Image: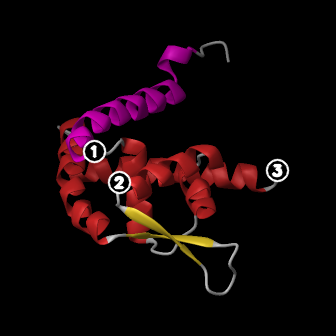
């Protein structure tokens, strides 16, 4: 505790990296008419067709109001659509439209380019270790908050 310095802490660095990646991704995706937050929703809907907004909220760790606005915008742009469940009319599933499916491959190159720039100088082994460390932090978070 005595040696703790916020500006030198892991949390500070993780937050700074996240913030800078989001800002840079917003710039990279602007020509495609997307924000980084909308991109994340598209990625999840592509990976899990038929998911619900509530599932996305848990996955992305965002509130329902923000998610509703993002889904509204992506629907207005014609990239995703809401589909009522046939089994339970209260449930609304999300799926990619043809326009969304066509857009998706265009989104990958700017994202990969951005990550490659930020990961310059890292060996594959170092990258694998970094990802492993971050996964461990996330797993520890799940364990520590599963009982609350």
Q: Calculate the distance from the C-alpha at mark 3 to the C-alpha at mark 1.
A: 39 Å
Label 3: how many residues lie within 10 Å, few (<14), some (14-19) or many (20+)?
A: few
Query: What residue is drawn where x is 34% and y is 35%?
Result: 21
Q: Magenta span has 144?
A: no
Main secondary structure found in the magenta portion: helix
| Image location of residue 44, percent across then percent down | 44, 62
- Look at 21% across and 63% down and name the residue there: 105
Q: Is 144 left, or right, of 148 in this rendering? A: left
Q: Secondary structure at mark 1?
A: loop
Which one is earlier in the sequence, the residue at label 1 or at label 2? 1
Residue 17 on the magenta segment: yes
| Distance Cα–Cα, label 1 vs label 2 | 9 Å
The total number of labels drawn is 3
Measured as percent of width and height from the top left, residue 45 is found at 43, 66
Q: Quadrant of residue 35?
A: top left
Contact? badges 3 and 1 (CB < 8 Å): no
Labels 1, 2: front one: 2
> Callout 2: helix, strand or loop?
loop
**Residue depth check, mark 3 versus mark 1: number of the one nearer the observer:** 1
Task: Label 3: state its secondary structure.
Answer: loop
Q: CA distance from mark 2 to mark 3?
A: 39 Å
Query: Residue 19's spot in the image, x, y percent?
Result: 41, 30
Q: Kindly indicate whether the residue at mark 2 contacts the one at mark 1 (C-beta within 8 angstroms).
A: yes
Circle 1 is placed at which residue position? 33
Residues at badges 2 and 3 in contact (C-beta under 8 Å)? Answer: no
Q: Which residues are magenta?
A: 5-32
Q: Which mark is residue 148?
A: 3
């Amino acid at each position: 505790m005595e040696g703790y310095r916020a500006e030198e802490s892991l949390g500070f660095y993780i937050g700074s990296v996240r913030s800078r990646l989001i800002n840079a991704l917003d710039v990279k995706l602007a020509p495609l008419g997307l924000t980084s937050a909308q991109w994340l929703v598209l990625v999840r809907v592509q990976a899990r067709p038929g998911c619900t907004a509530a599932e996305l909220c848990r996955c992305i760790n965002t509130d329902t109001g923000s998610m509703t606005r993002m889904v509204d915008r992506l629907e207005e742009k014609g990239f995703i659509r809401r589909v009522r469940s046939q089994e339970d009319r209260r449930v609304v599933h999300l799926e990619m439209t043809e326009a969304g499916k066509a857009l998706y491959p265009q989104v990958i190159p700017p994202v990969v380019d951005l990550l490659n720039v930020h990961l310059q100088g890292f060996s594959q082994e170092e990258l694998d270790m970094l990802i492993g460390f971050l996964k461990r932090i996330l797993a520890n978070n799940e364990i520590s908050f599963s009982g609350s």
